[in-house]
Image (spheres, rainbow, N blue to C red):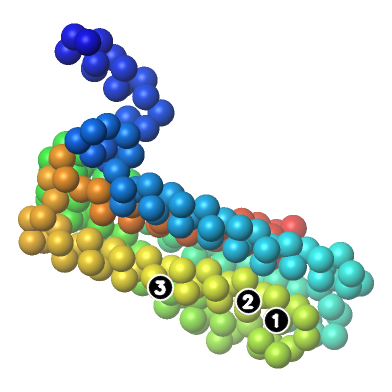
Amino acid sequence: MTADSHALTTEHSLVAGLAHDQRGGISNPVLGMLLFITSEVMFFAGLFGAYFTVRASTRPWPPADNPHFNLHEDPWKAAILTVILVTSSFTCQLGIWAIRRDDRRGLVRGIAVTLVLGIAFLLGQAYDYSQLGFGLTDGTFGTTFFTLTGFHGAHVLGGTIMLSVILYRALAGQFTARHHDAVEATSLYWHFVDVVWVALFSTLYIL
């Protein structure tokens, strides 16, 4: 295979943007993260399934015994959190694109901003919890709401820990354009966390 034909094949490959090992294909860290995300998709699918089951069997929904259950009346704090988390996905991807160009400073900037936005989301969610007017033990609505958002918050916390490790390693100069599998894997997880939150916001505050 000539160099030109190899470049053409790589350009049109579905996994060309992912980190590759020396034998070709997806690297082990990226593959492991994809498999882990697959299991997490099934986990959250079960939680969403439980929520919609409870919602379908409860009339009216949200229950009328607590006016604070009606999240549709005040979705703005959650909407701001959504903007923060979606923005963090873009900054994370900017860091990925930077290290693919061997731009280490760009990687540090992208991951640092992403980490700050992730922490801001967690603090904002904690504040939102304090203003809701109901708790985990307040009926099926409170239980399902805090289970869904609480588990997601735990995943965001895990993501910020991963981003912290990546930022530390990036500051130490451990990543290059050819060796940044951990960065790619972490970015996949962070994008997954963001997508789950968009689904949660749409389900709890809009539908």
For image coordinates 25% across by 68% down, the residue present is 164
Say left or right for 159 vs 135.
left
Specify whether residue 106 is in view. no
- 145 in relation to 177, above or below: below
Q: The C terminus is located in which quarter?
A: bottom right
Return the mark for residue 147. 2
Compared to residue 124, the image places residue 25 above or below, namely above
Query: Which numbered disc flags the more N-terminal residue, 1 or 3?
Result: 1
Q: Disc 1 designates what residue?
A: 143
Q: Name the residue under label 3.
A: 157
Q: Where residue 201 appears, x then y in whole percent?
A: 61, 61
x%, y% of residue 77? 55, 70
Q: Do the residues labelled 1 and 2 touch (CB within 8 Å)?
A: yes
Amino acid beneath label 1: Thr
Q: Distance between the residues labelled 1 and 2?
A: 6 Å
Query: Closer to the camera, 27 or 53?
Result: 27
Q: Which of marks 2 and 3 is nearer the N terminus?
A: 2
Residue at the image position 31 percent from the left and 59 percent from the top: 114
